[in-house]
Image (cartoon, helix red, strand yellow):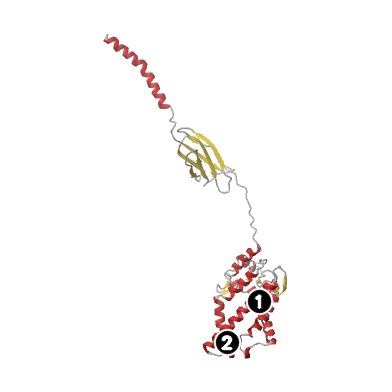
Amino acid sequence: MVSILLWLSAAILICVWPARAQSQAALAQSPDPEATGSIVGSVVDQRGTPVYGAHVTLAREGQVSLNTDTDQGGQFSFSNVAPGPFQLSVAATDFKSVAISGVLKPGEYHTLSAIGLVLAPVVTQVVVKPESVIAQEQVKQEERQRVLGVVPNFYVTYIPNAAPLDAHQKFQLAWKSTIDPVTFGVVAAVAGMEQESGEYSGFGMGAEGYGKRYAASYADVAIGTFLGSAILPAVFKQDPRFFYKADGSVRQRLYYAIAAAVICKGDNGRWQPNYSSILGDLGAGAISNLYYPPQNRNGAALTFESAGIGVGAAALANVVEEFIVPKLTLKFPLARRHQDSHS
């Protein structure tokens, strides 16, 4: 009986064990539905050249997006990615963005076909600025112009078609010029020379005499600047600046610089008699009689004579501005330097 039971048990084991082994083997080979996988790919341009630095984003529903950039070979990869649907978006400078989608199986090493990028169309943006804004930008540039980096050179423009100044900008230049430290220094030197030579004796001598000479000299500068370069230009709609010519022969440029003492460009862009400068010199000379000592005041004839001298001085100053100052002005535009060197 025992032997029969042993034989039956052996027979059962022989029949059952292979089936159980096959079941365990089959279970071992079936994928884990939660096993993570990998996604790899490459990014190329229209010619098949790898795109370096393209930004690749992996998005999956309900999960945090993953980001990476392509290497020098245009390759990218994502590891430990949960299985399921995914979407890839690729963006690179100068290229149109691309989006593709797929499904990652559990434990899969998913290799994508090369992702091709197409160049984005070139967009030209034209910014239209009001004329007053352009003029203000140019004024800011002019306020940085200094001969040898020290002496202000605000009333010169190196832009042939510079935007016309409005009244506020004309007064702005006049104010900047009269409060510049160099202006105060020059006035101080002039007052000292006047006192040393005994000029304007009605002011007296000593500290009080020097103070009166200084005040009178500064008043001459301030009144002349505001009257001839701000008030009258605003009234007559004229531009108080000297327009650097640069091109043409030396003779043409010389004639131009001399003529600029009696003609100027209007706010309408046309050349016209320089009423502002001439009347400004006459007005400043007449006003100076209010604060100079009676024995030192100018009569009508002397006032006109001084205005004529002022025109000659302006012509000489313009010649210097045209031929010499640009080489000494640190803020002189490079483009105009180049043009001047070939004239």
Q: Is residue 254 above or below residue 60?
A: below
Looking at this rendering, what residue extends furthest in the left direction? 2
Residue 300 seen from this side: yes
Q: Residue at 52% of width from left, 87% of height from top?
A: 207
Q: Which residue is mark 1?
A: 228
**Can you say which quadrant of the picture contains the C terminus?**
bottom right
User: How many residues crowd around disc 1 within 10 Å: few (fewer than 14), some, or many (20 or more)?
Assistant: many
- Numbered mark located on residue 194 in the image: 2
Q: Residue at x 59, y 83 (%)?
A: 217
- Please tell me which of labels 1 and 2 falls first in the chain: 2
Q: Secondary structure at mark 1?
A: helix
* Nearer to the camera, 164 or 286: 286
Could you say whether the residue bearing mark 2 is in a helix, strand or loop? helix
Q: Quadrant of the N terminus?
A: top left
Extreme residue in the front direction: 290
Going by the image, does 266 lie left or right of 337?
right
Q: Disc 1 residue type? A: Gly
Q: Amino acid at mark 2?
A: Glu
Q: To which quarter of the image does residue 241 belong? A: bottom right
Q: Which mark is residue 181?
A: none
Question: Which image quarter: residue 180?
Answer: bottom right
Depth check, front residue: 91 or 281: 281
